[in-house]
Image (cartoon, grey):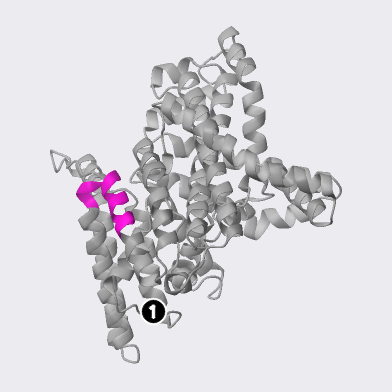
Amino acid sequence: MVFSSLLFIYIFLPVNLLCYAVISDIKKKNICLLIFSLIFYAWTSPKYLLVMMAMAMINYLGALGVEHFRSRRKSGYILAADITASLCILAFFKYLGFVCELSRFITGVPSVIPEIVLPVGISFYTFQLISYVVDVYRGDVEADHHYWKVLLYAALFHQCIAGPIVRYKDIADDLKERKTGIDDMNDGISRFCTGLAKKTLLANTCASIVESVLPESVSQISQATVLGSWFAMLLYALEIYLDFSAYSDMAIGLGKMIGFHYKENFNYPYTACSITDFWRRWHISLGTFFRDYLYIPLGGNRKGLARQIFNMFVVWSLTGLWHGASLNFILWGMYFFVFLALEKFVLLKLFGKIRGAAGKIVPRIYTGLVVFLGWVLFRFSDFAMLRACIRTMFGANGNMFTNVETNTVIINNIFFLIIALIAATPLVKNMSVRLQKMAVEGNINITHIYNALNIVLPVILLFLSTIALIGNSYNPFIYFRF
């Protein structure tokens, strides 16, 4: 599916850009973009294009109804009905099987679990459409009276299948009028090529090593070495960041190429100094969605300590459940809820009392370990495999600390690990910013070097990524399942 999606972009993006260059009228540009976006979605999930179109229609009508009855109580009922309808459709596709499994475990009914395929990106575009209607209800945006524009908002091929979650009010002006300058085009191409390289060269390699060292089998996990299991989970932590942030990079880059300006979705979360800081940096669009449309409406921290803890519990239960219909995701959400609550009331105050270099090092070590162990919960939906992995990591199965095979894998991949770790930090970005600043200040040699790198590096990354895509059929995209 990932290869198919990227192949579509390789083939149709130049055609789309050519159409943009030829067409000057914004309405015709949007119609062109809508057609390309619907073809793109049908390419990846042909059976469920009608689901997206129906969801867009429900929320299009909901927004019109809310706006029409804005000064009356009916607008609240319409909003509630709209949100309920949208979440029921999402729940049917994403959680019906999970609910049936729980029911069968408790009551023995039903005997057969229905197999329902999850439409690609349904979690993302459902949240987007809900945020649109809520913003109309709040008066932050006006309801769009053209259904096809609401459909375009939901179907934008840059980000509809794996985020980021884009709010209508953030791109409303771009939908009405947008221009693509040479700087936006250059930045967009560079950002897209960087994301593509992250995905094909780094995230896929991480995934391949993880599968070879720690395959998803209870017996094989139990027989792994302690060092091997930690090495594999470190690469998994890098994989999930590189994988998801890569898609956000590509979405932001593709958007810039045709005049859309999406907000950042990641801000180097592995450099965070607390779990609170981590979640300000990781999947920013999801975190702000839950904050603005759930946590604050529930009362946030304005109604006392007990209510604040309850609100956090609800938000993190649903954050976990959003990521997948499995108990391990709920457990993962609860895991972070506990640490966030501890930080809010205890840990951050304690960290604030640590002076000197230790005051910077200790919080980061704590954050890294908490996040790292959280990804162990995230990876295994099978509790037998989860238990086996945790026992192996702490040597509870009587595992060897290491062996020749583990040492060989680590030595063979140590330089790749260093590169992947650097890619998860702002080191390269900071060097680029510093180089740009020196170029702007008038250093002619630096200016030539900076301009050459801006031209050559995206071409090299695109070339290497294309070779990797052609030569490798293993292209997992973790967040497609959400």
Residue 158: give x, y in percent of width and height: 42, 53
- Looking at the rendered image, the quarter that the N terminus falls into is top left
In the current view of this chain or complex, which residue is farthest to the front?
22
The reply to whether residue 159 is in sight is: no
Disc 1 packing (10 Å; few <14; some 14–19; many ≥20): many
Give the image quarter of residue 152: bottom left
Residue in the picture at 32% in, 55% down: 36
* Magenta-drawn stretch contains 40: yes
Secondary structure at numbered mark 1: helix
Reply above or below: 379 against 59.
above
Residue in the picture at 74% in, 53% down: 350
**Magenta segment main secondary structure:** helix
Nearer the observer, 231 or 385: 231
Residue 289: give x, y in percent of width and height: 47, 64
Residue 147: give x, y in percent of width and height: 27, 72
In the current view of this chain or complex, which residue is farthest to the top?
404
Kindly identify which residue carries mark 1: 136
* Magenta-drawn stretch contains 129: no
Reply above or below: 4 against 392.
below
Reply above or below: 464 against 139.
above
Residues in magenta? 35-48
Residue in the picture at 59% in, 7% down: 404
Nearer the observer, 219 or 277: 277
The reply to whether residue 397 is in sight is: yes
Residue 380: give x, y in percent of width and height: 42, 34
Residue in the picture at 56% in, 68% down: 305
User: Seen in the image, is 323 located left or right of residue 82?
Assistant: right
Amino acid under disc 1: Val
User: Seen in the image, is 259 located left or right of residue 456?
Assistant: left
Nearer the observer, 412 or 299: 412
User: Seen in the image, is 148 located left or right of residue 441?
Assistant: left
User: Seen in the image, is 399 located left or right of residue 90?
Assistant: right
